[in-house]
Every structure is written in C-alpha cells, then in structure tokens.
C-alpha cells in the first residue's frame, strides 16, 4: 500500500494515458462495426465473407499484430497510433457479429409495418432498425470496452505508456504492489466505462430496461466470434 | 392397473400443480387426462414413470408403489411418447426406435430387426429407416415416437400431447392409427391433451382437470356429455355454447341432423 | 515492401532454423507448450462445464467468474506470477491455464446446456441414466460448441504464450523481445508473421474439426433448412 500512496500521481497520470489509449479505439470500433454489421445482415451473401474476415482478424495474436502493422501501414512501432489501430481492429472483429445479430433480431413485422407506413429506407434505418437493435449493440459495445481496456496494457512491452507500464516496471523492479495496482486500476477503468455505457444506454433507450434474453457472458460472446 | 392415491404436487416455488388426486385407471384401455394449461395433467402423467415425484401420496402400478422402483428401470419398462416425438436428432429412425431395447441390453441387430417390424406396425415405410428425424414430416416423426414407445412391448404407454404439433388432417390420421393399434395391442394408455374433441374421440374414459390440478369430472365421454358435473365442465366441453347440441330437421321428407347454427351435420337413419 | 522482403529472407534462412535456439526448436516448444496449457485447462474446466451444462446449476457464477478472469490483463497476471514464482516455465504455464479456463468452461456449459431440453427430457423419460444422457445425447450434440471453446482457448494461449517470453517463458516470443531490444526489425516482423500463420493454421484445423463432429442428423437439418426460405433467421447457436 505504501507504494500506492507515494505513487498516486504516477498512477493518475497513467490512468489518463490509458483512457486516451483505449477510448478512441472503442468509439472507432463501434462506428465502423455498425454499418458493417448492418451490411452483413442486410446482404446475406456478404455475411459469411464479412464474419470470416472478422474471425480471422480476431484469431491474430496481439503482439505479432502490433509488430506487423508498422511494416504494413507505416505507423511508427512505438506509438499510440499503432496501439489504437490494433485495438480498433480487434474491436471491429468482436463487434461486427454482434451488430449483425442485433439487426437480425429486430422484429420482422415491425420492420414490415414501418415500410408499409411509408418510411424511406434511411428513415427506417435511423428511426426503427437502429433503435431496436440498440440493446444488442450495447451488449456488444460492453464486451469491446472490457476487452479493449484490458488489452491496452500490452502497449507497455512495445514501449508505449499505459497502465501496463506498471506491470513491466513492477516486474523489473520487483514491486508486486505496483503490478497489483495496475491490475486493479485497469479493471476499475473497465468497470467504470462499462457502467457509463449502461447508463448511456438507459438514457438513450428508456424502453429497453429489461433484458430480453438470457445474459450472455463476455466469454460466450468471444466464443461466438470464433465461429459456430 | 395404475392407481393415484391422494397424490399432490407442490413445486419448490410454491405453485400447486396437482391437488390430492385419487384415480384408478383401468388396464388395457385408454384414459385421457384433459384440461387447459396449468391443470397439472402432464405432471400427473409424469408421476407414473417418476419423471416427477409426488410431494404427497403415492402412485401404484399393479399394487407396487413406484417410489420403491428404481426410476431408470421403471422408465425402461414404460412407453413414453411426447410432442414432436422427442426424437434424438443425431440418430437414424431405426436407432431411435431401438433406443430403449439397446439400453436394456438387447443386441443391436435384434433390436433393429424389431424396430423395422414396429415401423410396419405404426404404418411407416421401411425405406425411412435410415433417415434422420429432421428429414421426416411432423406426422412421420410422431409415428416414430409411437413406435419407440412400443419398442419394449410395455404394458403401459404414456402419451403427452403426442399429436399437438401436427396439422388437423394428420392429427385425425394419427388418432385413427392409435385406435387401430389399441384394438390390436390393448395397452394401458394414459393420454394427455388439451383438446376436448381429441379426448372424446380417443378416450374410453376421460378425466377433466381444472387449473391447480383438481379433478372435476371423470367418466366415459358419453357420461360426461350427458351430464356435465358443473358449469366449468359444460363450458369446457362446449355444451353451453351449443357446440355439441344437434337437432333434427326435416328437409324434403328426409330427416337430417343440424347443429346449433342450423348447419347440416348428417342424415338420421331410423 | 522492402522490410517484408528482409523479414522473409530472415525467416527462410535455413541457418536461423537450426540449433536449440533456432526457429524450429522454438516453434516446436511454442506449439507443445500451448497444447499442454490447453490440455491442463481442459482437464480442470471440462468436467465442471459439463456438470454446469447438464444440471443447469451454477451458470450465473460461472459467467461472472469467467468474465472477471477474462477482464484480468494478461500481462499483469504473467508478471505477478513471475515475481511470485521466479523465472521458470511454471509461472507462465499457470498463468496461461488460468486464462484458458474461461473459454473451455464456457464452451462446455454452453455446448452441453444448449442441447434441446426436450431431447434431454425424452432421453430421461426413455430410461437413460444421467451418465448415459451426458455421453449419448448431450456430448455428441454439444461437441461442436465444446470444441469451439477449446479452439478459442488455443488462440488465446498461442497469443499469450508469445507474451510469456517477456517473463522468460521461451517459445517464439523470445525472438520478438530480443529483436525489439536490438532493433532487428526484419527478425521481429518475420517471427510475427510466423506466429500469425501458426495461429491461423491452428484456428483452421479446429474450425475443420468443429465441422466434422457435427452429427450427421443435425447437419442434414441445417442443409434442408437452408433450402427453405427462412424469413427470420433463428438466432445462431452460440459457439
């Protein structure tokens, strides 16, 4: 505990850095996945292809990906940009399937009724499909949040600062308390961001208070990613 | 002979499914338990092969309390047919029918040969033997279910809404088939349904249950129709609505029978 | 693309494959170590998962515990165990087993528990013992999902085993950390691609296995279902 009290500044600093590293990829992943997921649902022929690409992407180990991206797209190896790009790719890989399922779960009759009432395709998307897919999208977003915040810690081994720096530093200097504080801070950030997402969901979708189906755990969702 | 002696079933959440039922079911005849959902009819049926154990009272088969019999052994000696057949999706038709004999240790070949015979008995073409359940129509699946129930030649056959999921035409076919089989085989059949017409069509005896697992009337279809025990039964069997009331009418010198709405139901022979 | 040419040149240089510190030996170690980890995790998690799936009890705690385990940063767990147990192969082994357990567990309870309760009910009514229900009904029908869980664990472990080199775990990750230190990017890139290829090959092999173990009767249904036009797609079974 002594170590924590005397290093609060450092931890606080890293929390901010960690947020800067993990929040942008979550937002990017969400914004990119929703249209891709919608396309995978809407154009059935594209579903297999898109989901396979995501499955393969998700199967790529993280450290090798971080080390390959610079050669592939020219981002500097030891840069936050490299981390954010890699994390966003994993986020997309995780989120597209959920998004496709979320759109697929929208009641076909509701969709039909809105078409019959004269909604244009765009109005139907923004006014009916997107809000009704919302709870499913939120569930996917939550998994992406938890996995991204946790994964962001490996930035430390390629020399990019994050809460993971407490792991490498604590390991090299033999201070378990430093590693523990990093683990706990990481998990707290994940919980806090998750709670924020849930809160946002409640504000945006007051009608969807009760979960419609049995809760799927994060691990189960990852399994779905690996493929049926 | 199956006897229910003061059986009661209360589930852990407090709901009472069956409220003190005393019933003795005659051997070699069809007894139909009929009631709407929540009337405890399926629970009562499942007490016979110990899929459900009563909270109070006992179920006796040929004067043996089933609670004293190992449930697995008991179930292997009683035929059970359920909605959608309850077939094992990963086994071929012939193996589905042979499941229980094989469980009882019969050699596979003999069990399969017998399964093929049973397919004849229930009116299934032998060419279907190597198909999987998913390749059959609903009616065919149901016949496989019946064949499987008969596979160990049990004295007792329990049928839990077996024809509930097929269309009306196939259902009538299957009902006829069951009556034909029963004439040949004379099993002790306990049949659960929520369909009063089906109950009257199949049952030598019909037991009407009300929500909460209370027996409200018990008798032959004719007895029940002639004298519904109370308003609930009358309403349930449709007597009040005039659904079962037929009148004579004279058309062109010939007596015909019409229903409550005046639609012809048949010709009366003197 | 010059770096890639250099990376391939390094990767396909036979001299780099030889010896106890060569690519061959480290690749073999990486694979064997990963499979040993998954075997360990399977021994622990499979029986528990099958039990949860069969009885339907304990699913909620399993979801919570495995979710929490998964939220645990892998690098944090690796370094903590390394400090506690010293630089040996045991610390990464234990850490990786812990990380692999949630996937195997979830695959097992989802696979076994996902078998239609009507089918299980029918099997019980016919007089199958609980053991027979597990072995003859739930295992064959749930196997693709169970293997899906193991597949997910393998991917997780191959990736984390790379990271484990940081605490002296050996394997292919060793090249990455030494290359990062010395600035040998062609080597880093070459080995990274090799690890990615390894992960994809293993993933493909498991995907194929998953397909092969789908019981024929179930596969047939999928086939006919595809022929009919389905207005609403039934939710894909998990896993």
Image: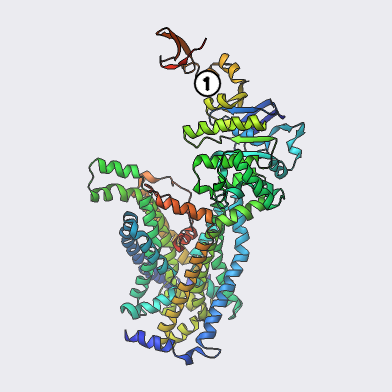
- x and y percent of residue A18 in the render? 39, 69
- Could one spot residue B60 in this view of the protein? yes
User: Viewed as shown, does residue C238 lie left or right of C121?
Assistant: left
Chain under label 1? B
Identify the residue position indicated by label 1 in the image: B237
Q: Does dot 1 land on a helix, a strand or a loop?
A: helix
**Which of B226/B28 is in front?**
B28
Q: Residue at x 40, y 82 (%)?
A: C189
Q: Residue at x 61, y 69 (%)?
A: C40
Protein image colouring: rainbow
User: Viewed as shown, does residue C21 lie left or right of A74?
Assistant: right
**Which of A164/A107 is in front?**
A107
Whether residue A13 is situated above or below residue B221 in the rendered picture = below
Quadrant of res B200: top right
- x and y percent of residue B137 in the render? 49, 43
- x and y percent of residue B65 in the render? 75, 34
Viewport quadrant of the N terminus of chain B: top right
Quadrant of res A54: bottom left
User: Viewed as shown, does residue A157 lie left or right of B70?
Assistant: left
Count residues near mark 1 (Cα–Cα under 10 Å), then give few for <14, some for 14-19, many for 20+: many
Q: Residue at x 31, y 62 (%)?
A: A32
Whether residue A76 is situated above or below residue B190 in the rendered picture = below
Q: Residue at x 40, y 49 (%)?
A: C228
Whether residue B170 is situated above or below residue C11 in the rendered picture = above
The mark total stands at: 1
- x and y percent of residue B251 in the render? 40, 9
Whether residue C236 is situated above or below residue A56 in the rendered picture = above
């Amino acid at each position: 505990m002594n170590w924590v009290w005397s290093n609060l500044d450092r931890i606080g600093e890293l929390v901010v850095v960690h947020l800067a590293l993990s929040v942008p990829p979550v937002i990017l992943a969400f914004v990119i996945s929703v249209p891709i997921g919608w396309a995978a649902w809407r154009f059935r022929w594209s579903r297999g292809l898109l989901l396979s690409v995501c499955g393969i992407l998700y199967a790529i180990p993280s450290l090798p990906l971080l080390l390959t991206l610079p050669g592939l797209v020219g981002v500097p190896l030891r840069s936050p940009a490299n981390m954010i790009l890699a994390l966003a790719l994993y986020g997309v890989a995780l989120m597209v399937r959920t998004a496709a399922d979320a759109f697929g779960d929208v009641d076909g009759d509701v969709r039909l009724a809105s078409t019959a009432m004269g909604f244009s395709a765009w109005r139907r998307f923004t006014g009916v499909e997107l809000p009704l897919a919302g709870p499913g999208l939120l569930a996917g977003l939550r998994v992406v949040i938890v996995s991204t915040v946790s994964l962001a810690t490996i930035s430390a081994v390629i020399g990019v600062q994050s809460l993971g720096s407490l792991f490498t530093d604590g390991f090299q200097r033999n201070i378990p308390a430093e590693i523990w504080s990093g683990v706990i801070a990481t998990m707290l950030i994940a919980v806090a961001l998750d709670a924020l997402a849930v809160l946002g969901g409640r504000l945006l979708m007051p009608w969807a208070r009760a979960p419609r189906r049995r809760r799927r755990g994060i691990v189960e969702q990852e399994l779905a990613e690996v493929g049926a | 002979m199956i006897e229910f002696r003061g059986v009661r079933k209360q589930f852990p959440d407090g709901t009472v499914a069956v409220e003190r039922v005393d019933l003795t079911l005659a051997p070699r005849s069809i007894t139909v338990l009929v009631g709407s959902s929540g009337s405890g009819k399926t629970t009562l049926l499942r007490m016979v092969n110990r899929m459900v154990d009563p909270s109070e009272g006992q179920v006796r088969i040929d004067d043996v309390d089933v609670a004293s019999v190992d449930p697995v052994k008991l179930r292997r000696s009683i035929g059970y047919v359920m909605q959608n057949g309850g077939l094992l999706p990963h086994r071929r038709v012939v193996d589905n029918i042979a499941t229980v004999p094989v469980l009882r240790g019969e050699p596979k070949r003999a069990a399969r040969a017998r399964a093929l015979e049973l397919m004849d008995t229930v009116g299934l073409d032998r060419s279907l033997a190597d198909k999987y359940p998913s390749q059959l129509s609903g009616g065919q699946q149901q016949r496989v279910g019946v064949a499987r129930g008969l596979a160990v030649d049990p004295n007792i056959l329990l049928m839990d809404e077996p024809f509930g999921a097929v269309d009306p035409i196939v259902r009538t076919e299957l009902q006829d088939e069951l009556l034909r089989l029963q004439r040949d085989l004379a099993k002790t059949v306990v049949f659960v349904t929520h369909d009063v017409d089906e109950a009257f069509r199949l049952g030598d005896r019909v037991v009407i249950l009300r929500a909460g697992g209370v027996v409200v009337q018990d008798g032959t279809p004719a007895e029940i129709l002639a004298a519904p025990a109370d308003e609930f039964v009358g309403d349930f069997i449709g007597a009040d609505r005039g659904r079962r009331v037929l009148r004579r009418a004279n058309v062109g010198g010939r007596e015909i029978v019409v229903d409550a709405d005046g639609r012809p139901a048949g010709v009366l022979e003197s | 693309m010059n770096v890639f040419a250099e990376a391939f040149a390094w990767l396909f240089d036979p001299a780099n494959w030889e010896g106890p510190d060569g690519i061959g030996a480290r690749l073999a170690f990486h694979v064997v170590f990963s499979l040993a980890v998954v075997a360990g995790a399977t021994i622990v998690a499979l029986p528990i998962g099958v039990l949860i799936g069969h009885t339907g009890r304990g699913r909620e705690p399993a979801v919570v515990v495995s979710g929490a385990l998964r939220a645990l940063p892998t690098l944090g767990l690796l370094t903590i165990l390394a400090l506690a147990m010293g630089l040996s192969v045991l610390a990464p082994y234990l850490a990786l087993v812990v990380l692999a357990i949630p996937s195997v567990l979830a695959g097992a309870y989802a696979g076994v528990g996902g078998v239609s309760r009507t089918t299980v009910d029918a099997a019980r009514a016919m007089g199958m013992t609980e053991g027979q229900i597990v072995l003859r009904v739930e295992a064959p029908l749930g196997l693709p999902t169970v293997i899906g869980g193991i597949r997910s664990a393998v991917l997780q472990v191959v990736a984390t085993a790379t990271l484990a080199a940081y605490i002296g775990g050996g394997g292919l990750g060793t090249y990455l950390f030494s290359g990062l230190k010395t600035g040998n990017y062609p080597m880093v890139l070459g080995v990274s691609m090799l690890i990615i290829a390894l992960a994809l090959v293993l993933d493909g092999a498991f995907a194929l296995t998953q397909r092969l173990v789908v019981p024929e009767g179930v596969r047939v249904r999928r086939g006919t279902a595809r022929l009919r036009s389905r207005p609403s797609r039934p939710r894909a079974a998990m896993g």
